[in-house]
Image (cartoon, rainbow, N blue to C red):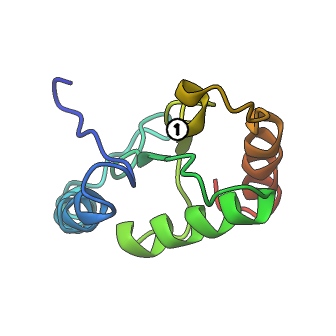
């Protein structure tokens, strides 16, 4: 990932987001000290993470809640890039022949709600 860090709820169930929070704080303080004069440059780190479509995440509101919790763990008011980690793959009963409907539309609606609420 070069100079980027990979984080997601599913990577340590929030632990990597909390560790990233410490790095964000450090990078933000360094960025404030160096304050660039160019308005086109990004000030501070770009924050990206993913939510995992766990079996209990079945409503758009559950996606918004996951986003809020990620914001808290990351120590930010807004996530610059919020991604869906493995869309529609968490269907454990499919291997036993049980039909499970896709929740991708629910996830997309939840992501839209995150945007509308200013979380991303």
Q: Pinpoint residue 82: horizontal percent, then vertical percent.
A: 55, 44
Asked which quadrant contains residue 32, the reply is bottom left
Give coordinates of residue 68: x percent, y percent.
58, 70
Horizontal side, residue 16 vs residue 103: left or right: left
At 73% across and 43% down in the image, what residue appears? 107
**Which element type, helix, strand or loop, lies under badge 1?**
helix
Name the residue: 64% across, 53% down.
120
Q: Quadrant of the N terminus?
A: top left
Please give left or right for residue 63 compared with residue 40 in the image: right
User: As displayed, is residue 102 above or below residue 65?
Assistant: above
The mark total stands at 1
Position of residue 51 measured from the top left corner of the image (x, y, whole percent)? 51, 49
- Where, by quadrant of the figure, is residue 116 drawn? bottom right
Question: In the picture provided, is 97 more to the left or to the right than 19?
Answer: right
Residue identified by numbered label 1: 92
Q: Residue at x 53, y 25 (%)?
A: 95
Vertical placement of residue 77 versus 56, above or below: below
Closest to the observer: 54 or 5?
A: 54
Residue sitting at 33 percent across and 64 percent down?
14
Determine whether, in the image, residue 101 is placed left or right of residue 11.
Answer: right
Q: Which of 78/6 is in front?
A: 6
Residue 46's x, y, as percent?
Answer: 40, 44
**Extreme-front residue of the structure:** 96
How would you rate the neighbour count of disc 1 (Cα within 10 Å): few for under 14, some for 14-19, many for 20 or more?
few
Residue sitting nearer the eye, 58 or 26: 58
């Amino acid at each position: 990932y070069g100079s980027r860090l990979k984080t997601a709820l599913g990577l340590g169930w929030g632990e990597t987001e909390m560790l990233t929070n410490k790095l964000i704080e450090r990078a933000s303080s360094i960025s404030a000290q160096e304050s660039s004069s160019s308005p086109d440059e990004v000030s501070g780190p770009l924050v990206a993470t993913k939510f995992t479509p766990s079996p209990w995440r079945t409503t758009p509101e559950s996606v918004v809640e996951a986003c809020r919790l990620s914001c808290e763990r990351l120590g930010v008011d807004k996530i610059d890039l919020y991604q869906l980690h493995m869309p529609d793959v968490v269907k454990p009963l499919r291997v036993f022949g049980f039909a499970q409907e896709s929740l991708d539309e629910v996830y997309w609606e939840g992501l839209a709600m995150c945007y509308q609420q200013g979380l991303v």
